[in-house]
Amino acid sequence: MNEFDWNQARAFRATVEAGSLSAAARRLGLTQPTLSRQVAALEDRLGVTLFERVGKTLVLTGAGTDLYDHVKAMGAAADAMALAATGQAETVEGTVRVSATDIFAVYLLPAVLGRIRALAPRLSIELVSSNAISDLRRREADIAIRHVRPEQPDLIARLVRESGGHVYASRGWVERHGMPAGPADLAGADFIGFDQTERLVAYLREWGLPVTTANIRLMSENSVAVWQMVRRGLGVGVMMREIAEMTPEIVPLLPDHPPAPVPIWLVSHRELRTSRRIRIVFDALAEALAVAPAPGAAMDMVPPPE
């Protein structure tokens, strides 16, 4: 057998983990035909069939399952080597990837990243705006801003501060429906929900709001879209206090109701924290996010409803 080709193994691994050739190609930044050729070349090299096509789905064969265990271990070793190499870098040049939820990225991070650019002008910062939790060990991001504490032992996390979430609606909504005196008055209200409706309802009920799935009439997996629907008076929504205070036409509906806890965690990999450029960004983010922005301090990205 000729020398093993890691690119072919990487294409195979990505296809298994992404679930399809198209998704794997996007993950690796390749075209689908290129990735397909790499997987086919690996099959030819090994003399085995790695996938069977069932309808539109790729299914691992027995040989593919056995090989994946080895390729996965190789990939973990390669990821660890990349992390260790990055950790040795002492330059303040290069790119640092910061991951945050879409709502956090739009409303809170632009001003913070502006300060970091002034502090280290030769750095490039890539903001990964996603509600999915980035895998720091796979280098999907160097630093992540999360609202849950990570459980992985090889990650380090700093609790920057505790924020809170409240129930909000537009002034126009209040004019039409009246200001609720207590949680019971929201039993018939339309809520703007996220894509995981049942999870949201369970959370709201645990928080003391008499909400069912029937209350969720509009929903989106995009938090910015959810917030814009609330701003337009289409229903009631839950949001971090700081973001709501940046939106003049929004009012709290239950100001005396205990806030929902929203912790702000800053997370990185242990080895990445030895990289000077990542350490600079990590510490600057921690310092900036430790202080809640003043009401109305950030620019409103979308014009208010007329």
Image: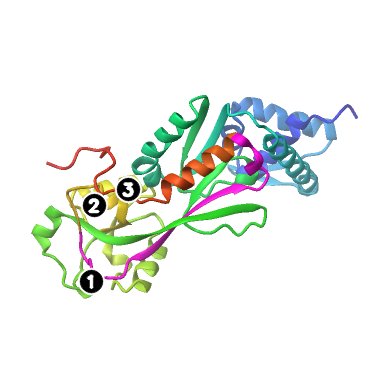
Classed neighbour count for the residue bearing mark 3: other residues with Cα under 10 Å, few (<14), some (14–19), many (≥20): some
- Label 2 close to label 3 by CB (< 8 Å): no
The residue at 31%/56% (across/down) is 239
Q: Nearer the viewer, mark 3 or mark 1?
A: 3
Q: Which mark is residue 293?
A: 3
Amino acid, disc 1: Ala
Q: Quadrant of the C terminus?
A: top left
Name the secondary structure under disc 3: loop
Classed neighbour count for the residue bearing mark 1: other residues with Cα under 10 Å, few (<14), some (14–19), many (≥20): some
Amino acid, disc 2: Val
Image location (x, y in percent) of residue 57: 60, 44
Look at the image and say whether residue 269 sits in the magenta stretch: yes
Q: Label 1 belongs to which residue? A: 187
Amino acid, disc 3: Pro
Give the magenta part as a residue range: 252-276
Q: Label 2 belongs to which residue? A: 230
Q: Is residue 96 above or below residue 61?
A: above
Name the secondary structure under disc 1: loop
- Label 3 close to label 1 by CB (< 8 Å): no
The residue at 55%/46% (across/down) is 134
Rendering quarter of residue 5 = top right
